[in-house]
């Protein structure tokens, strides 16, 4: 209930700012500029601008738990460089290569050393 109130309040405030839009996810409110931009484009920008787009020397890993992360998963899949990992208790369709059931499994993944 409080969540809906907060979302409505943010939406009301943004009516005064036509250059911004509200994007919602699972208990996530993202205020974004009204431009063609998403997390996938952010991943592409970072890989290119930081010169991290060489698949021979860099392995990007993107971990996310929300539908707003799907654009980033899709970019990694389409570029065939790196891996998207969805964190979700429930099985769902995703562009991610792998999925984990809980945030605690991310910690386990971070401790993995080949």
Image (spheres, helix red, strand yellow):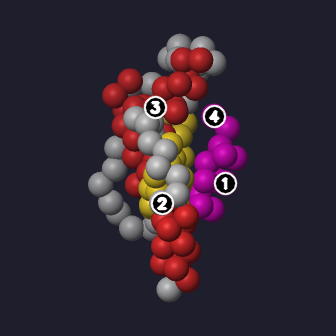
* Rendered view: 90 above or below 37: below
Q: Residues within 10 Å of mark 1 (few under 14, many from 20)?
A: few
The first of marks 1 and 2 along the sequence is 2
Which numbered disc, 4 or 2, marks the residue that appears first in the sequence? Answer: 2
Q: Residue at x 52, y 57 (%)?
A: 16
Whether pointer 3 and pointer 2 mark residues with C-beta atoms closer than 8 Å, the reply is: no
Residue at image mark 2:
15
Label 1 vs label 2: CA separation?
40 Å
Q: Where in the figure is residue 102, as x and y percent of width and height?
A: 54, 64
Which residue has dot 4 on it? 114
Q: Residues within 10 Å of mark 4 (few under 14, many from 20)?
A: few
Residue 113 or residue 56, whichever sits in front? 56
First in sequence: mark 4 vs mark 1: 1
Q: Secondary structure at mark 1?
A: helix
Name the element at disc 4: loop
Please give the range of residues in magenta: 97-114
Residue 27, numbered circle: none
Most extreme residue toward the bottom, as rendered?
A: 1
Along the horizontal axis of the image, is 38 left or right of 10?
A: left
Task: Measuring from the top left, give residue 90's x and y in whole percent.
Answer: 39, 67
């Amino acid at each position: 209930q409080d969540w809906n109130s907060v979302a409505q309040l943010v939406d009301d405030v943004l009516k005064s700012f036509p250059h911004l839009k509200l994007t919602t996810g699972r208990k996530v409110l993202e205020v974004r500029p009204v431009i063609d931009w998403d997390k996938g484009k952010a991943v592409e920008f970072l890989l290119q601008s930081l010169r991290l787009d060489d698949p021979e020397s860099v392995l990007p890993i993107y971990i996310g738990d929300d539908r707003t992360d799907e654009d980033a998963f899709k970019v990694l899949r389409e570029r065939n460089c790196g891996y998207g990992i969805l964190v979700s208790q429930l099985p769902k369709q995703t562009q991610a290569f792998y999925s984990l059931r809980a945030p605690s499994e991310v910690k386990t993944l971070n401790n993995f050393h080949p």
